[in-house]
Amino acid sequence: MPHKIGFVVVSSSGHEDGFSARELMIHAPTVSGWRSPRFCQFPQEIVLQMVERCRIRKLQLLAHQYMISSKIEFYISESLPEYFAPYQAERFRRLGYVSLCDNEKTGCKARELKSVYVDAVGQFLKLIFHQNHVNKYNIYNQVALVAINIIGDPADFSDESNTASREKLIDHYLGHNSEDPALEGTYARKSDSISPLDDLAFDMYQDPEVAQIIRKLDERKREAVQKERYDYAKKLKQAIADLQKVGERLGRYEVEKRCAVEKEDYDLAKEKKQQMEQYRAEVYEQLELHSLLDAELMRRPFDLPLQPLARSGSPRHQKPMPLLPQREERGTENQFAEPFLQEKPSSYSLTISPQHSAVDQLLPATDPHPKINAESLPYDERPLPAIRKHHGEAVVEPEMSDADISNARRGGMLGEPEPLTEKALREASSAIDVLGETLVAGAYSKTWSYREDALLALFKKLMEMPVGTPKEDLKNTLRASVFLIRRAIKDIVTSVFQSSLKLLKMIITQYIPKHKLSKLETAHCVERTIPVLLTRTGDSSARLRVTAANFIQEMALFKEVKSLQIIPSYLVQPLKANSSVHLAMSQMGLLARLLKDLGTGSSGFTIDNVMKFSASALEHRVYEVRETAVRIILDMYRQHQASILEYLPPDDSNTRKNILYKTIFEGFAKIDGRPTDAEMRARRKAATEEAEKQKKEEIKALQGQLAALKEIQAEVQEKESDAVKPKNQDTQRGKAAPAEALGILDEHYLDNLCIFCGERSESFTEEGLDLHYWKHCLMLTRCDHCKQVVEISSLTEHLLVECDQKDGFGKCYRCSEAVFKEELPRHIKNKDCNPAKPEKLANRCPLCHENFSPGEEAWKAHLMGPAGCSMNLRKTHILQKALALQPGKSSSVATSGPSGSKAGSKIPTPKGGLSKTSSRTHAKR
């Protein structure tokens, strides 16, 4: 299994005073690491020697928050290069490089933890640091490295692969499969996993002494699992989890103490020192109560010189190792006032996964000398105070508590809670007058179990209060209790938080009804606690978030609270722009759930406040909040239909460009049973395809008819040529006339003919027909919106389907005509339009809006006849010209192009030519 590899610093190109490269050999919360000299030349380099030849699997680098190198290169070698050992000429082999973030996004307040996965064998590692990132804090153009961690395997197991091969061969013949799911999660499948205790984050966050205890307990846990002592292993697992929080807190205290020393605030430093001593002793005593701590775990190696970490299972761990430098070499210039672990890594998660792993020996954070008077040393050189004191009153840090073991922990608590401070006495004076100082002191205690016990005692006291108690005393007790409940709701300990909710529920559902107190007292309970409860729904702990949200929902449904309509008014408060993501999501989720439970009738929820809140939530930066707002709006539409639309923008193409509003309006359509835009497009596409199919079939049929007519004409002409003599030419012409009357077409029948109005003219060449279509044909018109020439009979369909401005039109369900969408609601509301008849019964003129006889010939009569459409401007124009001409020419003028136009004149056809509808009609005819 890959593990942490110890190393020593062989050389470095330089360092600032007090920040030697040898600092990198120590992993602890208070280390300062290496810094290059001020205004140094680049690149800078550091050479590390590992305790043994190994195969490196992973490198971890903790960068400085503002002294950041733009690039770090890695080189590896089996031995020292020639400038260290003249008789060995081997050079370093380049592994690659990593780039570091310039940290501008965090304002240079975070440190980047970079993890690099490699596979290289060697004993010497060289790091080359390139030019620094420029920022306002790095005034000396330095680069720095806070810590480096090497994880790998010893490389000298010559028989390791052979052993593995033999084991695989044996397993094969025994029928064992290493890929068997039953083996999943066992240690056999974790040979390549890396223990979280070997991670750099563990040592950089943990107090060194606690880290040593954690590693020992982890070793015991693995032994217990091997011996199948699962109850003991479970107990050790819980202790390890709690100790990690303890170690983090002690590490934080140590940093705060060092910062105080740097600032010469010795009172604060002394307070932190005493706080660490007391807290460490209390935790250790608590571990002793559960038989988890003994002398072996507490023993620290004062008699040994400080040396790098070595793998206990390594075959070479007995090899003498070079000693690390003494503490005195580091000087006292370490600047502990640097921001420490307030930051979050940018490329690596510091969350420690609960994996089982092998145990490493501890790398102590200091190198104290045996039998030395600690008080005579400088402050920064003294050993940790916990070394000299291990016993004290058993108090457990609140963050490591858990409700499942609360009883066991309280069993070790003795004595009374600490006295109230002057600030607490002033703050809780009214509660002390009613409930007594002892109970309030427990609620204010720094020990979580005292706080929980105080709430349980208050619960019992309220339950036992007799019915005949004076109302004033009952009210005072209730208000004092709510004061303590409000404080307990903010508690970070889960068991204390849950006890406060239990007490609040009892007061609302039992205490107030039992003593017949007024609704004002219930309102006081809710109004004082609901803001704090809503705040807890944004907690970083998912468990607390869910608990708080569920209780708010439950409380809103209490019959005593439901009638007050208080909670809904809090849930529809607009979301703050700087509110946390969890808080916004929890508030939206609560609103959605309570709307289903309470509705909008006499519940505190109204259409107005819910829709205004939901409409504003659509603009929130978090996707989940916007998605929940959409669901709420759709639920409201199911209940209230059109009343919801006034809170939303109009349903048009611009609004639908927003995917949220498009989803909302399509949801409305589904609720109403109307087709959505996608369904409408699919229907139009299917209709277009069907029309194209019919057009092709009609063209094919017309072509067949034309071919048949040509064959008939050819047969007739052949018979006539054989039977008729020159003297019978008059008779032949007499027979030809009936043939024409029967409609037999010659090859040039369609020449010089307008297929729309039926007019024939010698001027109807290809260009002449274009001019005729563009200006004079009575069956056609120009679309005012796209300037295409279309048939008047299909103008409505063109405006709704083909026109460039089709999105601006809607269809009236009464007259079936195209109307501007802006005018459509007023058009429908006024009901002034002439209702259209079914297509089989009548045609509908889009110009004069009248119904007339069905059929295609009826269109000609209506649009071209003198008694037809009065709104056909082309017909009116021609009739006016006809009246002005001579009587002998009036007929020809009425059927020809404009007066004075030449057959060969070229008038440009409008862009797009005839519309698709006109082309289809042309082909059909």
Image: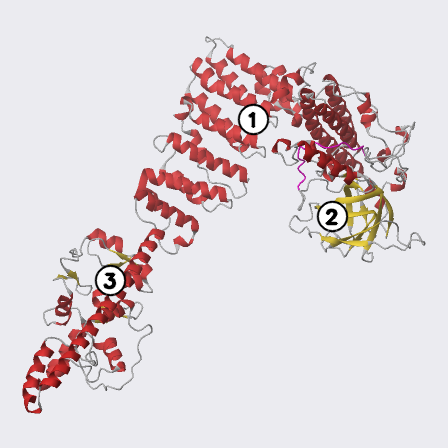
Q: Which residue is mark 3?
A: 796
Residue type, label 2: Val
Residue 234 vertical position relative to residue 827 in the rendered view, above or below = above
Query: Is 725 on the left or on the right of 232, as rendered?
Result: left
Q: Mark 3 or mark 2: which comes first in sequence?
A: 2
Bounds of the magenta segment: 349-362
Query: Is 326 on the left or on the right of 840, as rendered?
Result: right
Q: Which mark is residue 489?
A: 1
Residue at point 51%, 10% (across, down) = 464
Query: Is 540 on the left or on the right of 135, as rendered?
Result: left
Residue type, label 1: Ile
Q: Which residue is mark 2?
A: 118
Residue 42 vertical position relative to residue 405 in the rendered view, above or below = below
Mark 1 and mark 2: Cα distance apart in space: 48 Å
Category of crowding for the residue at label 1, using alpha-carbon neighbours closer than 10 angstroms: few (below 14), some (14–19), many (at least 20): many
Mark 3 and mark 1: Cα distance apart in space: 67 Å
